[in-house]
Image (spheres, rainbow, N blue to C red):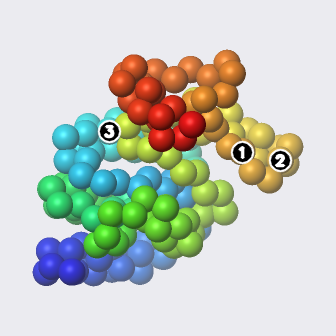
Amino acid sequence: MGPQQQDVMLLSTEKIMENSKNPPIEISIVIPVYNEEAILEGALRKLIPQVREMNRPFELILAANGCIDSTLIIADELSEIFPEIVIFNSPEPNYGKALRHGILAARGKIVLCDEIDLCDLDFYRRALRRLDHQECQMVVGSKAMRGSRDRRPFTRRAATRVING
């Protein structure tokens, strides 16, 4: 692990200790990221204010996995602006491992897993409503489910179908 990555992990640990003085985290949003320098800042500057409007204490866990671009640098800079951001880094590109690490590190009563290029607040609200009313213990969203509104570009949708079957 390079010195830059160690610094990011250290900053994240310090932030967790600092944030532990705040109200308990209700929602943890876990987002695995891999080489997302092109979209990370815009997505987080849009997402975080919208989640804040929900008036529920939250943390946003960026679970980096093998990034070789500026994703970690951008995430670290944004964590200075948005104290809700917590960064974890796994040096190997392994989506599942990053997601698992983020879920295990989550401090919220509710854990939402998302993708940086999706971040569907409408889904968050609908899932939280069901969970709050104890209609279920888990909510799973699917872009492939009948009736879903998958707004990703055609090439991305096609790649998902090829990979997932």
In the rendered image, residue 25, in percent from the top left (x then y), is placed at 56, 63
Q: Amino acid at mark 1?
A: Val
Up-down: is 56 above or below 125?
Answer: below
Q: Amino acid at mark 3?
A: Ala
- The CA distance from mark 1 to mark 3 is 23 Å
* Residue at the spot of label 2: 136
**Residue appearing at x 56%, y 45% in the figure:** 55
Quarter residue 143 falls in: top right
Task: Please tell me how crowded label 2 is: few (under 14), some (14-19), or many (20+) other residues with Cα within 10 Å.
Answer: few
Does any portion of residue 49 appear in the rendered image?
A: no
Circle 1 — which element? loop
In the rendered image, residue 24, in percent from the top left (x then y), is placed at 58, 67
Q: Amino acid at mark 2?
A: Cys
* Residue at the spot of label 3: 43
Query: Are the residues flagged by discs 2 and 1 in contact, CB closer than 8 Å?
Result: yes
Up-down: is 47 above or below 7?
Answer: above
The quarter in which the N terminus is drawn is bottom left
Circle 2 — which element? loop
Task: Please tell me how crowded label 3 is: few (under 14), some (14-19), or many (20+) other residues with Cα within 10 Å.
Answer: some
* Residue at the spot of label 1: 139
Up-down: is 134 above or below 88?
Answer: above
- Depth check, front residue: 146 or 131: 146
